[in-house]
Amino acid sequence: MVKTNLISVFRKLDQKEIKEFSEFIRSPFFNKNFNVIRLYEYIRKQYPEFDEEKLEKKYVYKKLFGKGPYNDGFMRTVMFNLGKLVEGYLAYSHFKKDPIKSSVSLLQELRSRKLDKVFLKNFEEVKKNLNNSQTKSADYYFHKYELNDLIEDFINITRYKNKNLQDFKEDTLQNSVDNLTHFYLIKALGKLRFLLAKQDFIALDIKFNFIESIIELLKSIKNEYVNDPVIALHLNEILLLKESKEEYYTALKKLLTQGQSEIDTDLRYSLLNVLHIFCNKQTFLGNTKYVKERFELYKIALKQKIYKGSEDRYFDGILFGNMLLTSLKIGEIDWAEDFVDKYSNELSPENRDGLLITLCRGSGFLRGNFPNLFRF
């Protein structure tokens, strides 16, 4: 059982989620099968080591369901039901992380049940919460589109009931189109930027004729789409990757340092990688000032805490090494010592010591030169 999908899911739950799932599985609304609860409680006791011997199916069956002959069909059914419950819990957890999404779902259900007064009350609240969002991501515009679609449907039904065929003052249809366009541009430009960033490492032959035409249009006109911070971000990233012009690098670095309230952490993390691609190319071409630029980008990454894809990940060993060696290359010895002291514990414990020894030797310095630099 230890190698099953069921156990692989439980390995990824933290202590808080294990406790929360215990409450989830005991709710009679979600589960009325006591055998499933018994199996979960047994698995929970094995968390987080999940000893292979104690999770052998026949052993577990004997421990939980008596001393009779092993019934593989019964055991598989209980495991299947528990698996479906934990998947349902994960879906619920994901849904709960986006209050706007759950609120829009509530509005859709209220509309389908024709609960107009309750719908309007909740609609105004959801609209207010969405408008207060600082970051204007693709999801933001899609939720705006959904809200416009809902209120447009409500208005049309109301007009039909009242036999009032005059247009309302609010142009909800225009808003729907604009929000859907924002959503498409952010998603399409983001995908193209991702593929362009990968083209130096992976052979790609993907045609983007339509979005390429849109890029040329966005370059030639100044409108609300170009002024959108996320669209401007992706547009400049694409242009930097395609044309390698310093003007795009400068614009993007400004977005990285000054646009933190409008550009979320994931986008800034991706932007940092795009900027490093440009710096690496320039350094390879002999433009030595970009060694210092890389060091500045590393400092920004640490300050903004965007040096890892997520907080629960280890510090990437290659990135750690690049940061350290770049700082040494430009003579930032004190910074290098502080960096190792502060961040080496975020490296994977399995590779930490070996990585630091390799970096020490590879940098051309011995421990004796910098006694505080490689303490482990």
Image (cartoon, rainbow, N blue to C red):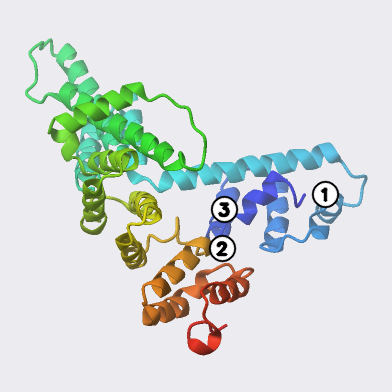
Determine the image quadrant of residue 169: top left
For marks 3 and 2, the one nearer the N-term is 2
Element marked by disc 2: helix
Element marked by disc 1: helix
Q: Depth check: 208 or 362 in front? A: 362
Would residue 5 be found to the left or right of residue 174 on screen? Answer: right
Query: Badge 3: few (under 14), some or many (20 or more) residues near its Cα, within 10 Å?
Result: some
The label on residue 15 is 2
Question: Would you name the residue on which mark 1 appears?
Answer: 57
Query: Badge 1: few (under 14), some or many (20 or more) residues near its Cα, within 10 Å?
Result: some
Would residue 373 be found to the left or right of residue 178 on screen? Answer: right
Element marked by disc 3: helix
Q: Depth check: 362 or 65 in front? A: 362
Identify the residue at horizontal 36%, vertical 77% (top origin): 332
Image location of residue 275, percent across then percent down:
34, 52
Which residue is most to the right? 69
The label on residue 324 is none
The label on residue 21 is 3
Query: Badge 2: few (under 14), some or many (20 or more) residues near its Cα, within 10 Å?
Result: few
Q: Depth check: 261 or 222 in front? A: 222
Identify the residue at horizontal 72%, vertical 51% (top origin): 39
Image location of residue 318, percent across then percent down:
52, 62
Count all numbered tags in the image, as a single digit.
3
Three-letter amino acid code at the position of disc 2:
Gln
Three-letter amino acid code at the position of disc 1:
Lys
Instruction: In the rendered view, tell whether residue 61 sits above or below residue 296.
Output: above
As measured in the structure, the alpha-carbon distance from the residue carrying label 2 to the one carrying label 1 is 24 Å
Instruction: In the rendered view, tell whether residue 143 sits above or below residue 312.
Output: above
Three-letter amino acid code at the position of disc 3:
Phe
